[in-house]
């Protein structure tokens, strides 16, 4: 693929591309998980409550995103 590059640089480029791809996959999965969370809580307007400054909803969203991040990290890694 990168035949003209030295072996060390070739490995670095491949690892960098893999890390970028898995990072992008993780972000997509995290966004998808948040959308699922919004679908299973239809009575809660997350964006509206956050706009009003509801700290409890902000903490709940942070906890959900942190939990999803751990799950995505285990699945992707």
Image (cartoon, helix red, strand yellow):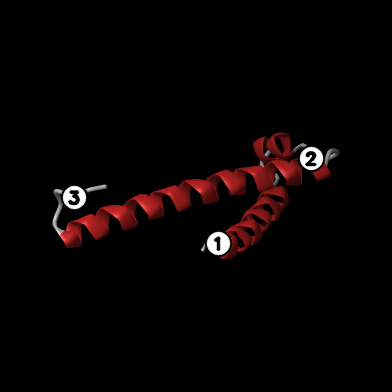
Quick one: label 1, few (<14), some, or many (20+) residues within 10 Å? some
Q: Residue at x 39, y 55 (%)?
A: 19
Instruction: Place residue 40 in its image quadrant.
Output: top right
Q: Position of residue 71 (x, y in %)?
A: 63, 62
Residue 39 image label: 2
Along the line of sight, the residue nearer the viewer: 67 or 6: 6
Instruction: Place residue 74 in its image quadrant.
Output: bottom right
Residue 56 image label: none
Q: Residue at x 22, y 48 (%)?
A: 2
Q: Position of residue 73 (x, y in %)?
A: 55, 61
Along the line of sight, the residue nearer the viewer: 27 or 43: 27
Please tell me whether mark 2 sits on a helix, a strand or a loop. Answer: helix
Please tell me whether mark 1 sits on a helix, a strand or a loop. Answer: helix
Q: Earlier in the sequence, mark 3 or mark 1?
A: 3
Q: Earlier in the sequence, mark 2 or mark 3?
A: 3
Quick one: label 3, few (<14), some, or many (20+) residues within 10 Å? few
Question: Looking at the image, do the residues carrying marks 3 and 1 touch, with CB atoms under 8 Å apart?
Answer: no
What distance separates the C-alpha of mark 2 from that of mark 3?
48 Å
Question: Looking at the image, do the residues carrying marks 2 and 1 touch, with CB atoms under 8 Å apart?
Answer: no
Along the line of sight, the residue nearer the viewer: 4 or 9: 4
Residue 3 image label: 3
What distance separates the C-alpha of mark 2 from that of mark 1?
23 Å
Left/right of residue 10 with respect to residue 43 in the rendered view: left
Please tell me whether mark 3 sits on a helix, a strand or a loop. Answer: loop
Q: Residue at x 72, y 34 (%)?
A: 48
Residue 73 image label: 1
Q: Residue at x 26, y 59 (%)?
A: 11
Quick one: label 2, few (<14), some, or many (20+) residues within 10 Å? few
């Amino acid at each position: 693929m990168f035949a003209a590059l030295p072996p060390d640089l070739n490995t670095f480029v491949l690892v960098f591309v893999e890390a970028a791809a898995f990072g992008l996959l993780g972000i997509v999965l995290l966004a998808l998980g948040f959308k699922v969370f919004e679908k299973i809580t239809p009575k809660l307007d997350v964006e509206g409550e956050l706009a009003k400054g509801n700290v409890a909803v902000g903490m709940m969203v942070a906890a959900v995103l942190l939990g999803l991040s751990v799950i995505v990290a285990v699945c992707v890694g």
